[in-house]
């Protein structure tokens, strides 16, 4: 599942229709004015992200997805010179 954001309602509805998504009103943290909130479309898994680009939208990762594991830490100091 991915979320696509759009500034124009018409763009969000067009993408939702093409990709069988669900249109909702998004909110950014700290925004008080409802007119400044973008329209968001909850996209099903496997949706084509190129359609979002056609309508000047952008994709955001879903917070419920686990973050990738960090690389392992070194076990010993790294030597810069031989000897």
Image (cartoon, rainbow, N blue to C red):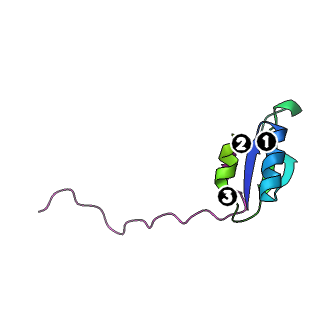
Region rendered in magenta: 58-83
Q: Position of residue 71 (x, y in %)?
A: 46, 65
Residue 31, quarter of the rendered image = top right
**In the rendered view, does 3 fall on the left or right side of 22?**
left
Can residue 33 be seen by looking at this rendering? no
Query: Height in image: 41 above or below 68?
Result: above
Which quadrant of the figure contains the C terminus?
bottom left
**In the rendered view, does 11 fall on the left or right side of 70?**
right
Instruction: Give the label on residue 48, or none.
Output: 3
Query: In front here: 75 or 44?
Result: 44
Q: Position of residue 2 (x, y in %)?
A: 72, 57
Query: Which residue shows up at 81% across the image and 31% down it?
Result: 36
Mark positioned earlier in the residue sequence (1 or 3): 1
Circle 2: is it few (<14), some (14-19), or many (20+) Cα within 10 Å? some
Circles 2 and 1, Cβ within 8 Å, touching? The answer is: yes
Question: CA gap, disc 2 to disc 3?
Answer: 13 Å
Question: CA gap, disc 1 to disc 3?
Answer: 15 Å
Circle 1: is it few (<14), some (14-19), or many (20+) Cα within 10 Å? many
Q: Secondary structure at mark 2?
A: loop
Q: Secondary structure at mark 3?
A: loop
Query: Which residue shows up at 64% across the image and 51% down it?
Result: 50
Instruction: Give the label on residue 11, or none.
Output: 1
């Amino acid at each position: 599942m991915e979320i696509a954001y759009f500034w124009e309602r018409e763009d969000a509805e067009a993408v939702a229709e093409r990709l069988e998504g669900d249109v909702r009103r998004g909110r950014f943290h700290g925004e008080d004015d409802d007119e400044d909130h973008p329209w968001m479309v909850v996209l099903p898994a496997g949706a084509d992200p190129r359609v979002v680009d056609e309508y000047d939208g952008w994709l955001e990762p879903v917070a419920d997805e686990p973050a990738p594991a960090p690389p392992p830490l070194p076990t010993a100091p790294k030597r810069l010179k031989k000897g």
